[in-house]
Image (cartoon, grey):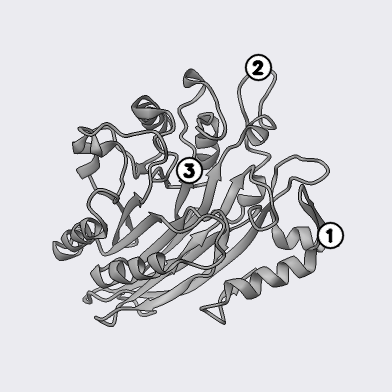
Amino acid sequence: MDNNTRKVTIGATGDILLHDRVYNKAKLEDGSYDFTEMLAAAKPLFRKDHLIIANQESIIGGAELGISSFPHFNSPIEIGYALKDLNVDIANMANNHVMDKGEEGILKAIENWEKIDMPYVGAYKSNDDRNTLRIFHRNGLKICFLAYTKSMGTVKRPKDKEYLAGSFADYGVKWIRRIINKIKGQGLADIVVLSMHFGKEYAMLPTSFQVETSSSLSDTGADIIIGHHPHVLQPPANIVNSKGEETFVAYSLGNFFSGQKGIYRQIGAYMTVDVEKPENSKMTKISNPKYTLTYVDSGDKKDYKLHLLKDVVDRQKTIKTDVGEFDSQQVYDRMRNHMRHYIPDLDIS
């Protein structure tokens, strides 16, 4: 990289979806919650020089709204503080659980994110809030985060308050394309990082909709697309669009921290990717995608702690889940091979 090339490392997590069996493990005698120890394994991964987005799938409406689990989630504010402590820079709220506690839940969650001093994207308190782009300045680059969901779940959004949830169900992908065109066309940002809540739950490979939508958004100028919703890891891909520009697509980052059961639902990842841009060029270069596999333990101890999967493999010969016992090395090898489906030399550990 020459002296005139600017670079930023984008980091991202999979779904943080707090079931009762997870938040009950974090509950203290005084009724508050502390997720620090449960997430301690992530601390070395989430470097301060990374620009990190976390998919907080359950809203953090806090105790005032009543902490709750499936099907309508509401999580303790303390998970937000834990993410802040882990160097997360921005929280994504665009998902099919965003309306779980209605308008009140979104507004309270936003109030809590503001209390934590954590930027958020994908749900908003007003039209002005929605129209305010989330742009970070790093190493001479402007990075814009956008976030949308295909579904908003079973709780209906008020028709006159579309700003509450960033959904593309109303206007289709062309609406997102228009926004990216404006950002890139007017030079508002050098890099667009797009979170998309799409795909089929528990599908190990992306659907045709995910692939075609990502291709369309790549043509418009999305540099990185981060997928959520399947709750399992799907292999990433590099796209070169019709203009010769690169887009890195993480079709699904799986579950990062949740109470879902099943070997593939308990394995997630922390993903990083470098984006470089020469000073006098409009072209960006995507390089060095890296995945670190993680695992949430629901075995004999049922402590629901986050572990690095490699550490689990080094420590024990088998992995026990509620649905069976598996050879840990075979699971690790299988996941690494699976994630290299489109990128054979993907750096994954």
Q: Whole-percent x and y of residue 217? A: 29, 66
Q: Earlier in the sequence, mark 3 or mark 2?
A: 2
What's the residue at 47%, 49% (across, down)?
A: 54
Q: CA distance from mark 1 to mark 3?
A: 30 Å
Q: Which residue is mark 2?
A: 30
Q: Residues within 10 Å of mark 3 (few under 14, many from 20)?
A: many
Query: Do the residues under discs 1 and 3 have CB atoms within 8 angstroms?
Result: no
Q: CA distance from mark 3 to mark 2?
A: 25 Å
For this view, does 38 lie left or right of residue 116? right
Query: Do the residues under discs 1 and 2 have CB atoms within 8 angstroms?
Result: no
Query: Do the residues under discs 3 and 2 have CB atoms within 8 angstroms?
Result: no
* Secondary structure of residue under mark 3: strand
Above or below: residue 291 compared with residue 58: below
Does the rendering let one see residue 137? Answer: yes
Q: Residues within 10 Å of mark 1 (few under 14, many from 20)?
A: some
Q: Residue furthest left?
A: 186
Q: Earlier in the sequence, mark 1 or mark 2?
A: 2
Q: Which residue is mark 3?
A: 56
* Secondary structure of residue under mark 2: loop
Q: Residues within 10 Å of mark 2 (few under 14, many from 20)?
A: few
Q: Earlier in the sequence, mark 1 or mark 3?
A: 3
Q: Which residue is mark 1?
A: 318
Above or below: residue 342 compared with residue 261: below
Q: Residue furthest right?
A: 317
For this view, does 165 lie left or right of residue 93? left
Which-is-in-front pick, marks 3 and 2?
A: 3
* Secondary structure of residue under mark 1: strand
